[in-house]
């Protein structure tokens, strides 16, 4: 079967149209991923700014400590015993907020890793190092912080590994 010049040009045209449609589809997917990442990063940074504001004001920390002690929300999070300071509940609240800030920073790194921006082994090592020093805090992180599914899976697997080592 011999192709004429006209048929060859038409075939090349069809292939180029298909290739350009594939490229446009890939570009749309990338644009969507970037938009999702920007929203996720903005939400995380907003939450971190709110938490930092609590840390800057002793009155806010006291109000938060009073609220948690008077409501059921305070008992719903598993707080490691080492964090509790009965004489100064403000220190307990400050410790919880600092941990939540750390977890949000890790969550953002893990999310960016899921987008292919970081090496997953380095992030895993960083997260594991954080919780190796204070293994009880991993349960607090899993229960009290809104985190991405990939971060939750990573924390659960690290928790299991730390349990097996002990």
Image (cartoon, rainbow, N blue to C red):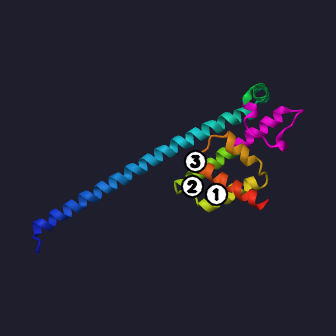
Q: Say the numbered circle drawn on residue 113.
A: 2
Circles 1 and 2 in contact, beta carbons < 8 Å: yes
Q: Which residue is mark 3?
A: 149
Along the horizontal axis of the image, is 151 left or right of 55?
A: left
- Farthest residue to the bottom: give it: 1
N-terminal of the pair, mark 1 or mark 2, is 2
Magenta stretch: residue 162 in it? no
Magenta stretch: residue 79 in it? yes
N-terminal of the pair, mark 3 or mark 1, is 1
- Closer to the observer: label 3 or label 1? 3
Residue extent of the magenta highlight: 73-101
Query: Circle 3 sits in a helix, a strand or a loop, which is it?
Result: helix
Q: Residue 120: name its quadrant.
A: bottom right
Tell me how far mark 1 sits from mark 2, CA to CA.
8 Å
Q: Is residue 119 above or below residue 1?
A: above
Q: Position of residue 97 (x, y in %)?
A: 73, 38
Query: Circle 1 sits in a helix, a strand or a loop, which is it?
Result: helix
Tell me how far mark 3 sits from mark 1, CA to CA.
15 Å
Q: Which residue is mark 1?
A: 123
Q: Residue 154: name its quadrant.
A: bottom right
């Amino acid at each position: 079967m011999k192709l004429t010049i006209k048929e060859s040009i038409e075939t090349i045209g069809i292939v180029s149209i298909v290739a350009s449609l594939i490229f446009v589809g890939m570009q749309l997917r990338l644009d969507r991923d970037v938009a999702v990442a920007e929203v996720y990063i903005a939400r995380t940074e907003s939450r971190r700014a709110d938490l930092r504001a609590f840390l800057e004001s002793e009155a806010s920390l006291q109000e938060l400590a009073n609220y948690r002690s008077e409501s059921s929300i305070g008992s719903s999070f598993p707080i490691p015993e080492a964090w509790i300071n009965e004489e100064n509940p403000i220190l307990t609240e400050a410790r919880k907020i600092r941990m939540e800030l750390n977890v949000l920073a890790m969550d953002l790194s893990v999310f960016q890793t899921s987008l292919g921006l970081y090496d997953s082994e380095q992030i895993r090592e960083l997260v594991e190092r954080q919780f190796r020093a204070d293994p009880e805090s991993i349960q607090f992180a899993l229960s009290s912080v809104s985190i991405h599914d990939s971060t939750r899976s990573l924390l659960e697997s690290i928790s299991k590994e730390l349990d097996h080592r002990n």
